[in-house]
Amino acid sequence: MIRPLAILAIAVALAGCDGKPEQAAATGTPAQPQTGGVLRVAFDGDPNCIDPQQAGNNTALNVGRQLVDSLTDQDPQSAEILPWLAERWEVSEDSRQFDFHLREGVTFADGSPLDAAAVKANFEAIVALGARAQLAGTYLAGLETVEVTGPSSVRVTFKQPNAQFLQASSTMSLGLFSLDTLKRTAEERCQGALVGSGPFTVKSFEHNRLVRIEARPDYRWPSSIAQHQGRAWLDAIEFHILPESGVRLGSLLSGQIDVNTSVPVQDEAVLQAQGVPSINRPNPGIVFSLTPNVSRAPLDELAVRQALNKAIDRSQFQGVISRYQKPATSVLASSTPYYQDLSSHLAYDPAGAEKLLDDAGWRKGADGWRQRDGKRLGFTLDYWQATTPVLELVQQQLRKIGVELRLNKSTIGQVSLQQTSLDYSLWFFNLTRADPDVLRTVFLSPGRNVNVRAPLPLDRLLLDSAASLDGQKRGALIQQASAELLDLGHVLPLVEMATVTAFRDVVHGLHYEASTRLQFYDTWLAQPGGH
């Protein structure tokens, strides 16, 4: 039987931030969608790898979402799981077995069929990717078998209950590629050797410059929550890599780009004064945080990690972040299902921080820096995101208790290499997903293990929260796991993210999907021949 998944509705924090704002019609603007045109979109960084089965950053996933379809979709307002490639499905009572029944007639861009055998091959290929499948691999953790039970029917069975998998099946990370794509090397796929069943196909990818994708003329199987049928309205999308916020702002105002996907706080007032339309949405999942590598001294000391948490005054962040964002109150964003306010675990207590460090032997010298055995207490943070004001504020706050935070603005490629090789002391990141299982994805010791830690009882909480079929019990497990992560200093939450996207008034139908990534299938240009 079909058993509805127990998911709490996502609470949208701001009125009008559902990603589908009403736009005032400009003079001469057609009332109906127009076919054609090239949408020019600005990213703030290089996607690095545009294969959604491997990628983990939002820039890459915003590209990948356009290339692949998923078995299901998730309503961004209610969080309900709805049909896409799968017309229907059944979930066993113990949530170990998932039977999907596919719509017929779907093909990949090379003409090959998207059938049950293709689903089986994709899921098995994701597992074979190992650590390269940064998100997708964790969604399929514990996979036992994938069976073809009919030409259009596939059964996915896990070794243990898996309450998160149905939501995971809606993500682009579990989007599907042709069998020929699966034969390519991981590196080739990262660089654009990808053939999906989605509404767009890859035309070119030039690192740090441009990604161009083009509409597939014969596409006709959109999600059940799409606003139209048939091919995408746009002819093509060009994703331009423009790291400098001032360049993105000037390019949007001058009409050289149509969409700015990363609006920094300092540009919001300018865009509002100019009457530039925008959409915004809170990002569910893990908030922007610092995560310590506990295999490195002195972050292997609980007292040091706890002192860092107590030294951060999150209330001060409001002065440097967007009006759509807010200081973190937990490791999970408030728009995530099962979120609980754990701000009592994040209380600003500089005196408590100083005592912890004093007791651990880290004493302040005449210069104000703490030392022990002749070594200064300090860490280097390499980051690539456009959130420098928040990090500079953290740097100042830690300085007050005698801890040195050295900030190094780098590139996504360099930071990704450090993370892959575990060559970091602190990792600054967020991870967007409309399911609390994102905690297991990031913190489980046999999994991604961003803390590089040994197994702990915490792992049992993370595993049980992913397996629990009882909504109340699952919520309690998630709250307990979240509190333990905070109390152990395994995560230092900073800011609850919201994505702000600005665009020219000729752009229509732009909206976010459930995990606050952009969906361009329904987007159209009022002047498709204008560029």
Image (cartoon, rainbow, N blue to C red):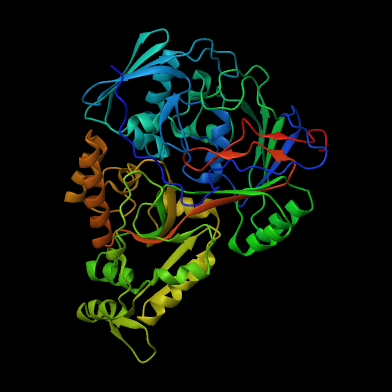
Residue 181, x across and y down, in percent: 52, 24
Total labels: the figure holds: 0
Question: Can I make out residue 488 in this image?
Answer: no
Residue 149, compared with residue 356, is above or below; it is: above
Q: Residue furthest left?
A: 457
Left or right: residue 223 versus residue 521 is left
Q: Nearer the viewer, residue 301 or 422?
A: 301
Left or right: residue 347 versus residue 11 is left
Left or right: residue 443 versus residue 228 is left
Residue 504, x across and y down, in percent: 73, 46
- Of the 4 image quadrants, the one containing the N terminus is top left
Residue 329, compared with residue 83, is above or below; it is: below
For the point 39% across and 25% down, the residue is 123
Q: Which of the 4 quarters of the picture holds residue 150? A: top left
For the point 37% across and 87% down, the residue is 368
Q: Nearer the viewer, residue 78 or 83?
A: 78
Residue 487, x across and y down, in percent: 24, 62
Residue 468, compared with residue 270, is above or below; it is: above
For the point 32% across and 68% down, the residue is 309
Question: Can I make out residue 521 in this image?
Answer: yes
Q: Residue furthest bottom?
A: 366
Left or right: residue 478 versus residue 291 is left
- Of the 4 image quadrants, the one containing the C terminus is top right
Q: Nearer the viewer, residue 443 or 347?
A: 347
Residue 122, x across and y down, in percent: 43, 23
